[in-house]
């Protein structure tokens, strides 16, 4: 096997998805380089995940940080070009749909380095979401496409991606969840945050929900209504903090605002929750596997398998409180089996495809 596999990660969800792939390739004896773009940089958005998930310390942190889409993507492109040119990897592996993912795939493609995309083929069909733009472009550039669900395979096939490049491998985010499941101490987390027996967990960070003051105020109002029925613990992503605080969320009875939590603390709270209210991609998947009811405050999802095979339901603002009351009254249907191949072995499947590919092309 010649040449290294260079992983590019930059944000909280990237770390959760990359950890099992890096571990499995390490176990297979693969030469690896881990590049952190620095898109997320607060200790609670970055360092804590490396510690808790056993990710190796990044070989490089490019320190790109925040900015408008154009500024951030431009800075990512320039920084990644230097890094990839210097390291000359055999393959660049990218995760999910964030700006770091797009920038890494674009730089690699222009340098002639093949790209592997973990979590390929998800589609919300809403081009107003920056993630949808990123996903579609990355999938056009990738040589190896790792899909988490049969729908994703179907989307890629319809977009003309050759079948031999698509691999249905399951979900590495769920590998991470199952690896750490025993550490998720729901009772301890509830006590630490002085929550009642029944509580809900809320995360909100999508631009459509938190960026402009009217949207944030509408979200804060509907959460205040929900908190009349269930205490809500809200570890706030930095993106929503200012707007949701300005909308009065911090002073709402029954709402417990927190800083972003480490993975184990967060998943401990989710594991014990009566319900989760979110707009996160990953949280829709994690609740499905934990069997915790999830109400997603969005009109679309790129993860419909969490609705058909899990506990997820999309709700508009006006539907949230009735849906919450129904499930608190025991009206939630029993969750089905769970999506196929979400069994904790996706990292190993991805590593086998990559090592086989390296033997043929390295
Ligand atoms: C990014 C992804 C989004 C993903 C989310 C996961 C893009 C376009 N969006 O959104 O798909 O769901 O990560 O969490 O890539 N900030 C901090 N500290 C940090 C990081 C960010 O304070 O460590 C603040 C900054 O004010 C920054 C804002 O959060 O401007 C947004 O950060 P950014 O990385 O641009 O996008 P996210 O909203 O985090
Ligand atoms: N997460 C965490 N602490 C938090 C919120 C989230 O550890 O306070 C984890 C959780 O596993 C989630 C992942 O970070 O699935 C990604 O989170 P986020 O919602 O930011 O990203 P998305 O999946 O929407 O891109």
Image (cartoon, helix red, strand yellow):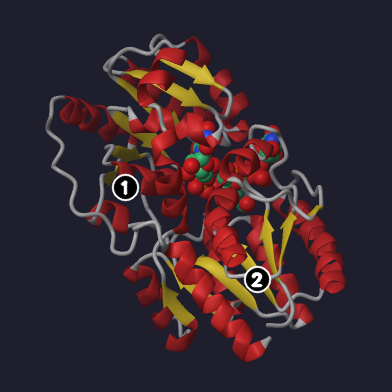
Q: Along the polypeptide, which appears first: circle 1 or circle 2?
A: 2
Q: Is residue 199 positioned above or below 65 on the image?
A: above
Q: Nearest the camera: 83 or 308?
A: 83
From the viewer's perspective, tell me whether residue 78 is left or right of residue 337.
Answer: right
Instruction: Indicate the quadrant where residue 115 lies.
Output: bottom right
Distance (Cα) linking label 1 and label 2: 30 Å
Q: Position of residue 2 (x, y in %)?
A: 72, 82
Q: Position of residue 185 (x, y in %)?
A: 40, 27
Q: Residue at x 62, y 32 (%)?
A: 238
Is residue 120 among what the camera can see?
no
Q: Is residue 263 positioned above or below 152 on the image?
A: above
Pick out the residue farthest to the bottom.
360
Q: Is residue 6 positioned above or below 276 on the image?
A: below
Which residue is tagged 1?
289
Which image quarter is the N terminus in?
bottom right
Which image quarter is the C terminus in?
bottom right
From the viewer's perspective, tell me whether residue 23 is left or right of residue 80.
Answer: left
Count of residue discs = 2
Q: Secondary structure at mark 1?
A: helix
Q: Position of residue 17 (x, y in %)?
A: 53, 54
Q: Which mark is residue 38?
A: none
From the viewer's perspective, tell me whether residue 64 is left or right of residue 194.
Answer: right
* Quadrant of ligand 1 in image: top right
Which residue is tagged 2?
30
Q: Nearest the camera: 259 or 209?
A: 259
């Amino acid at each position: 096997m010649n040449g290294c596999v260079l992983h590019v990660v930059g944000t909280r969800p990237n770390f959760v998805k990359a950890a099992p792939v890096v571990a499995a390739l390490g176990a297979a004896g693969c030469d690896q380089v881990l590049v952190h773009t620095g898109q997320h940089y607060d200790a609670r958005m970055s360092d804590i995940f490396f510690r808790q998930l056993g990710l190796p310390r990044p070989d490089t942190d490019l320190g790109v940080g925040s900015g408008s889409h154009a500024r951030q993507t431009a800075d990512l492109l320039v920084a990644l070009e230097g890094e990839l040119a210097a390291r000359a990897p055999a393959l660049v592996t990218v995760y999910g749909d964030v700006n770091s993912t797009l920038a890494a795939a674009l730089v690699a493609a222009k340098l002639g380095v093949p790209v592997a995309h973990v979590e390929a083929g998800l589609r919300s069909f809403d081009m107003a979401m920056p993630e949808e733009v990123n996903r579609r472009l990355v999938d056009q550039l990738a040589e190896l496409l790792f899909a988490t669900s049969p729908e994703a395979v179907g989307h890629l096939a319809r977009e003309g991606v050759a079948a031999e490049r698509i691999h249905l491998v399951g979900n590495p985010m769920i590998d991470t969840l199952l690896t750490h499941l025993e550490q998720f101490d729901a009772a301890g987390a509830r006590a630490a945050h002085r929550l009642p027996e029944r509580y809900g967990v809320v995360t909100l960070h999508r631009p459509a929900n938190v960026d402009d003051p009217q949207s944030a105020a509408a979200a804060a109002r509907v959460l205040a209504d929900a908190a009349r029925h269930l205490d809500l613990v809200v570890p706030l992503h930095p993106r929503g903090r200012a707007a949701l605080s300005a909308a009065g969320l911090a002073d709402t009875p029954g709402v417990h605002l927190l800083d972003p939590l480490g993975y184990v603390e967060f998943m401990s709270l989710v594991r014990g929750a009566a319900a989760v209210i979110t707009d996160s991609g990953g949280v829709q998947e994690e609740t499905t596997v934990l069997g915790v009811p999830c109400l997603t405050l969005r009109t679309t999802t790129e993860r419909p398998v969490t609705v058909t095979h899990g506990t997820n339901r999309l709700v508009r603002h006006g539907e949230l409180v009735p849906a919450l009351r129904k499930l608190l009254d025991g009206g939630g249907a029993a969750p089905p089996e769970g999506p196929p191949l979400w069994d904790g072995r996706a990292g190993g499947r991805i590593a086998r495809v990559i090592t086989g590919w390296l033997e043929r092309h390295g």
